[in-house]
């Protein structure tokens, strides 16, 4: 089945990349399901579902991607967005207008069911989704170094959402490249969109990640009223 989506993340994942986005129709209009944008995460039959980097490294956030879906894994899983696809079918069909991105933001009270950095094995079964698009105007990058590996610092995004503070690892390659080269470049932005992802099990927890960061220039107008309220199921 031919499917189009707006790329919201092309992030680092063990062994390759994690591609994710919001489905759109042939007229490039977003598709909604139960009042929320319909997400998709193409995966491969690899150890962690990762896509080989050489297949998707050229894809940028907001690219309009078309793929052929071949089958579906366990859709009852919290990563219900996952689909298997023909790796030879990847095509780019232009760019999605950032001015229309605001209408795809969700308005959930907390991120993936709680206010912490991860979800427990006991609670993961309560979730039926693992991707989320939000926006925030309170954010900063936190750089941490560790004694056992000081040459490879870790980058985290500290941000505020719905009055709560969060601190998640950044896995967006383009953002990390720009930040490492020009640490002050984020000062040019007063707001950002975040594609948040819930990863696979690691040390008996499911960790929350900042998979995609889309900065908003002050000159770019995004309708703040085009967001969707929580649905109680």
Image (cartoon, rainbow, N blue to C red):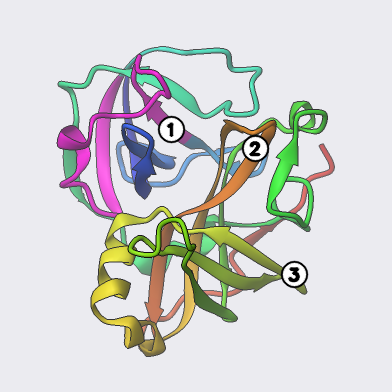
The picture places residue 123, in percent across and down from the top left corner, at 81, 33
Circle 2 is placed at which residue position?
206
Front: mark 3 or 2: 2
Residue 155, quarter of picture: bottom left
Badge 3 local density, few (<14 within 10 Å), some, or many (20+)?
A: few
- Residue appearing at x 17%, y 33% in the figure: 55
Circle 1 is placed at which residue position?
41
The reply to whether the C-beta atoms of the residues labelled 3 and 2 are less than 8 Å apart is: no
Taking the magenta stretch, the answer to whether it contains residue 58 is yes
Badge 1 local density, few (<14 within 10 Å), some, or many (20+)?
A: many
Q: Which residues are magenta?
A: 40-68
* Mark earlier in primary sequence (3, 2): 3
The correct choice, above or below, for 87 with respect to 146 in the image is above
- Residue appearing at x 38%, y 24% in the figure: 43
Taking the magenta stretch, the answer to whether it contains residue 41 is yes
* Mark earlier in primary sequence (2, 1): 1
* Mark earlier in primary sequence (1, 3): 1
The reply to whether the C-beta atoms of the residues labelled 2 and 1 are less than 8 Å apart is: no
Under circle 2, the secondary element is strand
Whether residue 44 is visible: yes
Circle 3 is placed at which residue position?
162
- Residue appearing at x 43%, y 24% in the figure: 48
- Residue appearing at x 27%, y 46% in the figure: 64
Residue 127, quarter of picture: top right
């Amino acid at each position: 089945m031919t499917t189009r989506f707006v790329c919201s993340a092309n992030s680092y994942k063990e062994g390759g990349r994690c591609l994710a986005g919001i489905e759109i129709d042939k007229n490039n209009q977003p598709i909604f399901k139960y009042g929320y944008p319909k997400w998709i995460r193409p995966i491969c039959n690899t150890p962690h579902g990762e896509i080989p980097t050489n297949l998707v490294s050229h894809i940028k956030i907001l690219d309009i991607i078309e793929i052929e879906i071949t089958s579906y894994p366990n859709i009852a899983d919290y990563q219900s967005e996952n689909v298997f696809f023909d790796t030879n079918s990847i095509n780019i069909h232009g760019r999605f207008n950032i001015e229309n991105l605001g209408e795809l933001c969700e308005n959930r009270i907390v991120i993936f069911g709680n206010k912490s950095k991860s979800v427990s094995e006991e609670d993961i079964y309560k979730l039926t989704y693992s991707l989320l698009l939000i926006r925030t105007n309170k954010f900063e990058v936190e750089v941490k170094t560790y004694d056992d590996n000081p040459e490879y610092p870790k980058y985290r995004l500290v941000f505020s959402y719905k009055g709560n503070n969060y601190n998640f690892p950044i896995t967006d390659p383009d953002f990390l490249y720009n930040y490492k080269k020009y640490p002050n470049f984020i000062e040019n932005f007063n707001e950002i969109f975040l594609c948040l992802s819930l990863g696979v099990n690691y040390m008996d927890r499911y960790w929350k990640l900042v998979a995609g960061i889309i900065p908003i220039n002050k000159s770019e107008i995004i309708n703040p009223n085009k967001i969707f309220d929580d649905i109680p199921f």
